[in-house]
Image (spheres, helix red, strand yellow):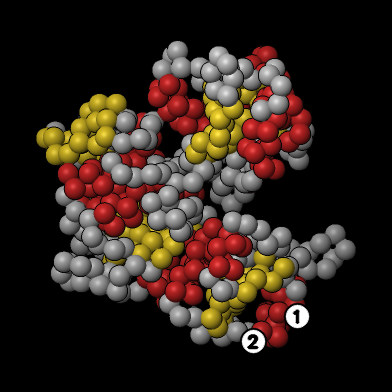
Amino acid sequence: MHIHILGICGTFMGGLAALAREAGHRVTGCDAGVYPPMSDQLRALGIDLIEGFGADQMALKPDMYVVGNVVSRARLPDGTPKFPLMEAILEAGAPYTSGPQWLAEHVLQERHVLAVAGTHGKTTTTSMLAWVLEANGLQPGFLVGGVPLNFGVSARLGARETPGQSPRRPLFVIEADEYDTAFFDKRSKFVHYRPRTAVLNNLEFDHADIFDNLAAIERQFHHLVRTVPGSGRLVVNGLEESLDRVLHMGHWSEVRSFGTAVSDFSALGEPHDFEVLERGRSVAHVEWALTGQHNQLNALAAIAAAQHVGVSPSDAARALGSFQNVRRRMEVRGTVARPEGPITVYDDFAHHPTAIRTTLDGLRRRLGNDGGRILAVFEPRSNTMKLGTMKSQLPWSLETAALAFCHAGGLDWDAREALAPMGDRAQVALSVDEVIAQVSAAARAGDHIVCMSNGGFGGIHARLLAALAGPAQ
């Protein structure tokens, strides 16, 4: 069939486009400000991209319009539609569906779906699980909201049959997002996926633009739990009271917990080198390049999920030893040589206060107390952070940083006031240029500069490295 995707450059919709193309469909798409890297990946696949959401795209006459959740019925200040193509689709009575619905009907049916849900760590844990299955010869399909370095692509269909499995139901690993599906379907995306193995990695309040409180998100997670069959497995973080409440609403599948000393799966040792215990008995050993307790927990979740489809914990742990992480997860973007020691610049996706704190704590633990200063550079860019819902948690999230630099352009709340408890350890700027100037002036040999955003951050990484490579401050 011919599908035309509205909002094709998002990580989820771009991955869906790649899967559809691999399956033999004709795929076209549109977006506002068609941008790399997704635009480059899609064009390399032979997918035609159109700039904007003009109604003239109706002339394509696809079999189905697949609508991303970036699309709405919003109006511009002059009263004209922000998405004229969507208005034309509705007026014509043309066929349309959401991305998750199309995926469920055309890719996920007849597959054993392993879904990874949670406020934090979805992309990393999904990538870990896909790699564990791949390294053990199971050739899974996957759709990840990032690019796992072991694969180099964000999505693939995988084998039609799972080697050595009986029944030979093909495996598909998917990042299961709790954000809403589309403007016409306000259920969480993950309700469409019907997993047999579901990871509930953690659960905090987020997405303040669509959820009123934590209880509303817990209810959506329970909708996911309701879709798991009796022969399925729920892999649940035992450290999270919110997930306890979700399970207490009812569950009908096997539960395997991880994280606490009394969980089914726990860890003994440092996050980069630890024993995996199953009900108190050592069953595997993980030694890898990743740091931070959050990644240790992610590993336990991946091991417990892989066990459900026949991969032993020891084989899973061996695969994790060669796991290369995901782009934009503490990715070193470059170093600048100084006589007294290099300055290292990292890129990280962290944007929720808890994610910021765990990212910085993980780096501090890896470096040790004498391993140089950590400078945190961040922009509150997610919808929740833009609303200021979590601004009071920022000083807590940045405690590990010696200095913090906030890009506050476009915010409706006062970042200086929110960061006031940090005193002179925090600086605020209204432009990326000003942030770069502040960081360049403060940086010194041996520093580790972590740039955190869920967007492009104005290309700050390369620009900052260029600025630091100038005359020493």
User: Residue 451: where, in percent of width, then height?
Assistant: 59, 34
Residue at the spot 38% in from the left edge and 31% down from the top edge: 291
- Residue 439 in sight from this viewpoint: yes
Count neighbours of disc 2 (C-alpha within 10 A) and say few if under 14, some if 14 to 19, many if 20 or more.
few
Q: Considering depth in this image, is 199 or 205 the residue closer to the camera?
A: 199
Q: Residue furthest front?
A: 339
SS type, badge 2? loop
- Residue 19, compared with residue 58, is above or below; it is above
User: Residue 466: where, in percent of width, then height?
Assistant: 68, 33
Residue 445 image-quadrant placement:
top right
Cα distance in 3D space between marks 1 and 2: 10 Å
Q: Considering depth in this image, is 162 or 230 the residue closer to the camera?
A: 162
Q: Which quadrant of the rendered structure holds the C terminus?
A: top right
Q: Considering depth in this image, is 139 or 90 the residue closer to the camera?
A: 139
Residue at the spot 44% in from the left edge and 62% down from the top edge: 155
The amino acid type, in three-letter code, at marker 2 is Lys
User: Residue 366: where, in percent of width, then height?
Assistant: 40, 24
Mark 1 touches mark 2? (CB < 8 Å)? no
User: Residue 103: where, in percent of width, then height?
Assistant: 45, 70
- Residue 308 in sight from this viewpoint: no
Q: Which residue is mark 2?
A: 61
Image side of residue 414 versus residue 93, left or right:
right
Q: Earlier in the sequence, mark 1 or mark 2?
A: 1
Q: Considering depth in this image, is 159 or 223 the residue closer to the camera?
A: 159
Residue at the spot 19% in from the left edge and 53% down from the top edge: 311
Q: Which residue is mark 1?
A: 56
